[in-house]
Amino acid sequence: MAAMDAPPRALISVYDKTGVVELAAGLVELRWELLASGGTARVLEDAGLPVVDVADHTGSPTMLGHRVVTLHPRIHGGILADRDDPAHQADLEANAIDPIDLVLVNLYPFEASPGIETIDIGGPTMVRAAAKNHAHVGVVVDPDDYEAVLGELRSDGHLSAATRLRLAGKAFAHTAAYEAAIAGWFNAEDGPDEPGLPELIRLELERAEALRYGENPHQQGARYRARGTSGFFDGVVQHGGPAPSYLNLMDAEAAWRLAHDLGDDPTAVIVKHANPCGVAVAEDLATAYARAFDCDRRSAFGGVVATNAVIDDATAEAMVSAAQADVVIAPAYAEDVIERLAARRANTRLLEAPTNAPPIPGWDVRALGGLAGEFLVQTPRRLEADPAGWQVVTARKPTDAERADAVFAWRVCAHTSSNAVVLAHDGTAWGIGAGQQNRVQAGEIAAAKAAGRAEGGACASDGFYPFADGIHAAADAGVAVVVQPGGSVNDAQVIAAADERNLAMLFTGERQFRH
C-alpha cells in the first residue's frame, strides 16, 4: 500500500452515510489519513475527526456547481498508480501525488430521483479506478462491508488480496447497475419501440436468502430481489416449522396472490406445485378452508394454504384435523393459534405476510438459457376484461347467481396452468383441471374431481373451445353456464352446442393462458 514513510490514506465520498463516522473513527485510530469532499467532509468534521478536504488536497476549488470535485490528477493518479511500476512511482514523485490506499464511495440513488443533475460522474470514476487497481487499492461501496474491512485492517494491518478482489467485483457490479439505471431512464425518456417493452431492461439482483435447495435436492437455490428494493418475502415473518424451500416460496406466492384476487370475503386457497387444488370463499374462514380442503383432499396433502383473513380458532381446528400442509401463509393468527398449529403440525411452516398481494412487476421475465442466454419478456398478466362487459352468446342468459359463479371460476382459472378448466359453484372451485395438453382432458379431470358438486354452477376455460366436445363435457358435468374467451373459427358450432344443452355461455374476449 502506501510508502513506509507516509500514513495510509482513505478517500471517503458517500451519499449513504450509514456507519461512515464509525468507520472513519476506526481508521483514525489506526493512524490513517482521511480525505473527503462536500457533505461527507462536513459530517466527519462535525464528528470531531481530522479530515482533509479534497479541494485542499488537490489545490483546485470545487467548480461548475459541484460537477467537478474529484476529477483531478492528484486524486486519480493516487488511486490508479501501480505501486510495483517504477515509472508510475516516478510520475507520482514528479507531480507530488500521494497514493490513495482505500476508496469508500457510494453513489446517489438515481432511481429515487432520476435526472441529469443526479447522474454522478466523479463517484463512478473513482470506484472504477480503485476496482481496476485492486492489486493495491481497496474499494468499498456497501456500508454492510465496513465492519469486515475495519476488522481486517485492525487484525492484519492491511486488506488481503482476496478481500480486495471481492470488493472490486462488488464495486463494478455497483457501477454497472447505476449505469444501467441511467440508460433505462434515457430509453424511457426517448420512448420504447413497443408500448411497455423498453429496448433495455436492467436485471440487477442481490441475494436475499439462501434456500435449502432448488426444485430438486441436487440443485442449489436462493431467493434474490431487485437491488435496493424490499421484496414481498422480506416482509414475511416465519413463526414455526423448518426453513422454506424453493418450491415452498413459489407455491406460497401463487397461493397468496390468488387468495387476494377474489375479493374481501374470507378466502382459503390450497396450492400444490404452483396450481390451485382447492379454492373457496365463504362467510367465515373456517368454512372457506373446509370447502377448499374438500375440493381435492388427496392433492391437499403437502400443499400450501393461503388465506386473506386472520386464522382464528375454528380455522386452526379445521386445519389440524385435515391433511398436513407444508406451508400456511396468512395475514395474522389469533392468540395461541400459532402454538396450537405448531404443536400439531411441527413440519408446517407458519408464515405471517403483509396484507397486500405481491406487487405486479413491470415486466414478466423468463430465462430461456439462464443469465448467459436469452430471455422472453412480456407485460405482466392481468385480468383486464370487465365481467360487466362479457358477451352473452347463447339463447339462455345466465342468472345473477350463475354469473357470479362464472366470475369466480374465471378468476381461479386465470391462476391455473394451461390448458385449464375450472368447475365452480357457490364460491367453491370443486373441480380444477390444470396443465393438460388438450382442453377436453382438462375438462374431464375437472369433472372427475368435482364429482357432481358443481351442478348448477359454472365452467371456466382459460382458452377458447375449438370444438363442441368441450361444451358437451361441461354440460355432462352439470354446470349451467360456461365462460370462455371466444374467438375460435368454430364459435358458431360451439354456441350451437351450448344452446342444444340449454347452457348459458359468456365470451370474455380475453385469453388467460399461463405456462
Image (cartoon, rainbow, N blue to C red):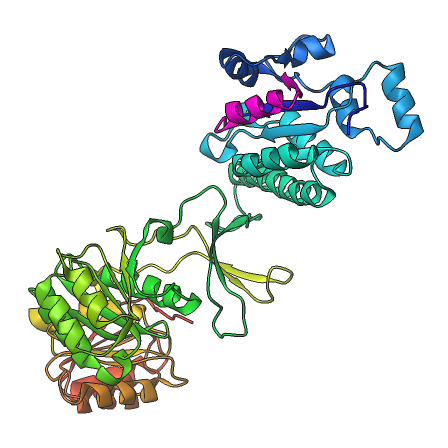
Does any portion of residue 148 appear in the rendered image?
Answer: yes
The residue lying at 67 percent from left, 10 percent from top is: 55
Residue 293, quarter of the rendered image: bottom left
On screen, residue 31 above or below 223:
above
> In the rendering, at what x and y percent does residue 304 appear?
29, 70
Residue stretch in magenta? 15-35
Q: Is residue 340 left or right of residue 98?
A: left
Query: Is 245 placed left or right of 45 in the picture?
Result: left
Residue 3: x %, y % from top left: 81, 23
Q: Residue at x 54, y 36 (%)?
A: 147
Residue found at x 77% / y 23% = 99
- In the picture provided, is 234 more to the left or to the right than 226? left
Using residue 77 as the reference point, say whether residue 420 is left or right of it. Answer: left
Residue 458 in view here: no
Q: Quadrant of the C terminus?
A: bottom left
Q: Classify 16 as above or below 451.
A: above
Say which of 21 and 280 sits in front. 21
Indicate the quadrant where residue 439 lies. bottom left
Residue 408 at x, y = what percent?
A: 19, 68
Q: Choose between 429 and 96: the one closer to the eye.
A: 96
The quarter of the picture where the N terminus appears is top right
Instruction: Reply yes or no: does residue 34 show up in magenta.
Output: yes
Between residues 250 and 242, which one lies in front from this camera angle?
242
Q: Return the residue nearer the eye: 220 or 413.
A: 220
Q: Is residue 238 above or below residue 87?
A: below
Could you say where residue 292 lies in the image, as x and y percent from the top left?
18, 74
Magenta span includes 344: no
Q: How many marks?
A: 0
Question: Which residue is found at the position 24% from the left and 71% from the top?
Answer: 345
